[in-house]
């Protein structure tokens, strides 16, 4: 999968705030993701994001 900063990814499990959508802030070996529900930021390994991703939305689309 091709991820770019600004993409919105839907992950398998919801965040404790209830949101399943995250904005990609940084791409590399690790991803920095921002929860769209509560603005919490996390760093996650690339393979975990690729495994748990259920969909990608490009900005403006």
Image (cartoon, rainbow, N blue to C red):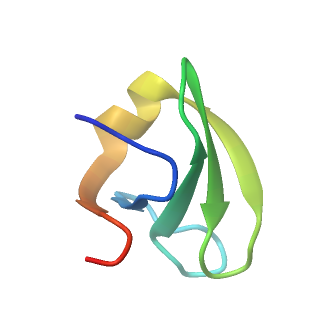
Which residue reaches farthest right? 40
Which residue reaches farthest top? 29
Q: Position of residue 39 (x, y in %)?
A: 74, 73
Q: Position of residue 61 (x, y in %)?
A: 25, 77
Query: Toward which corner of the image does residue 30 lie, by quadrant?
Result: top right
Q: Position of residue 2 (x, y in %)?
A: 27, 36
What is the quadrant of the N terminus in the image?
Answer: top left
Instruction: Name the residue located 52 percent from the left edge and 78 percent from the top edge.
Output: 19
Instruction: Name the residue located 54 percent from the left edge and 23 percent from the top edge.
Output: 28
In the displayed structure, would residue 28 be above or below residue 61? Answer: above
Instruction: Name the residue located 28 percent from the left edge and 59 percent from the top edge.
Output: 56
Q: Position of residue 59 (x, y in %)?
A: 38, 70
Lateral position of residue 46 relative to residue 33, left or right = left
Query: Toward which corner of the image does residue 54 lie, by quadrant?
Result: bottom left
In the displayed structure, would residue 32 be above or below residue 10? Answer: above
- The count of marks equals 0
């Amino acid at each position: 999968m091709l991820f770019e900063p600004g993409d919105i990814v839907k992950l398998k499990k919801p965040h404790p705030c209830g949101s399943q959508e995250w904005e990609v802030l940084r791409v590399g070996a690790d991803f920095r993701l921002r929860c769209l529900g509560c603005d919490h930021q996390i760093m996650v390994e690339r393979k975990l994001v690729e495994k748990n991703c259920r969909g990608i939305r490009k900005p403006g689309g």
